[in-house]
Amino acid sequence: MRRDAVAIWVGPKGKVKVPPLRLRSGQALAAKSAARMGHPAERSVRLTHRTGMDLNWLDGTEDERIGRIAVGGGIWHADYRMVELKGEGVTHIINMQEECDDTDLAQAHGIVVLENPTNDDFLPKPAKLFQAGVDFALAALKEPDAKLFIHCAAGVHRAPMMALAVLGKLGLNLEDAMQMIEDRRPVADFADVYVKSVREFLGQG
């Protein structure tokens, strides 16, 4: 059973509960960081966490390949999360995070991984980063039963960025692709510098 993240913010006007669709990336990360650090000024921040694997499928499109792509957060060496991914039908993973390598754990479950680590530093990203992910994704999606999971640590910046490049290569207009990803995964956040990097990779810069 899953529960979406909910934050309780206490400010001058009292408690404010932020529902899942309004819990944007900056709020979520700030709340988690404050809760973790126990900062005196932020002890009023309280989070409930969804259990299980954090992912959203990009379904509901005419292109069935897109419906076999999911975007989400980290696996973090948790075998039960990899088991859940296997149960979702995931056969391939693009891991964009530097913080954790999925290869050994995924191999034990017969899932193929591309480790494509990048720093979430809000700096321009090179074309080779996108090319590696796109080549892997398109090759995987040629297999009719393949399902692809693109993730980073929180599924906020790097994974949506990579998914955007894949959708662009599949022929989607980037504005439509960003809207689709945000609709399916409300915490996704597209930094201008990352979108510019994707445009340049696709020759639209």
Image (cartoon, rainbow, N blue to C red):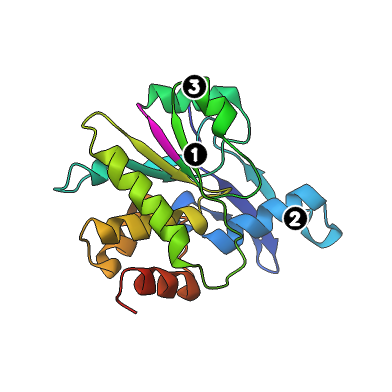
Lateral position of residue 149 relative to residue 106, left or right: left
Reading the image, the residue beneath label 2 is 34
Badge 2 local density, few (<14 within 10 Å), some, or many (20+)? some
| Inter-mark Cα distance, 2 to 1 | 21 Å
Residue 91, image x, y percentages:
37, 29
Identified by mark 2, the residue type is Ala
Q: Is residue 33 magenta?
A: no
Question: Is the residue 110 above or below the residue 121 in the image?
Answer: above
What element does badge 2 sit on? Answer: helix
Disc on the earlier residue, 3 or 1: 1
**First to last magenta residue range:** 89-93
Q: Is residue 90 magenta?
A: yes
Query: Which residue of the protein is positioned furthest toward the left in this rendering?
Result: 62
Q: Residue at x 54, y 36 (%)?
A: 50
Residue 19, image x, y percentages:
49, 51
Identified by mark 1, the residue type is Asp
Badge 1 local density, few (<14 within 10 Å), some, or many (20+)? some
| Inter-mark Cα distance, 3 to 1 | 13 Å
Identified by mark 3, the residue type is Val
142 or 6: nearer the eye? Answer: 142
Disc on the earlier residue, 3 or 2: 2
- Please tell me whether the stretch drawn in magenta is mainly helix, strand or loop: loop
Disc on the earlier residue, 2 or 1: 2
What element does badge 1 sit on? Answer: loop
Query: Which residue of the protein is positioned furthest toward the right in this rendering?
Result: 40
Reading the image, the residue beneath label 1 is 54
Residue 16 in view in this figure: no
Asked whether the beta carbons under mark 3 and mark 2 sit within 8 Å of each other, the answer is no
What element does badge 3 sit on? Answer: helix
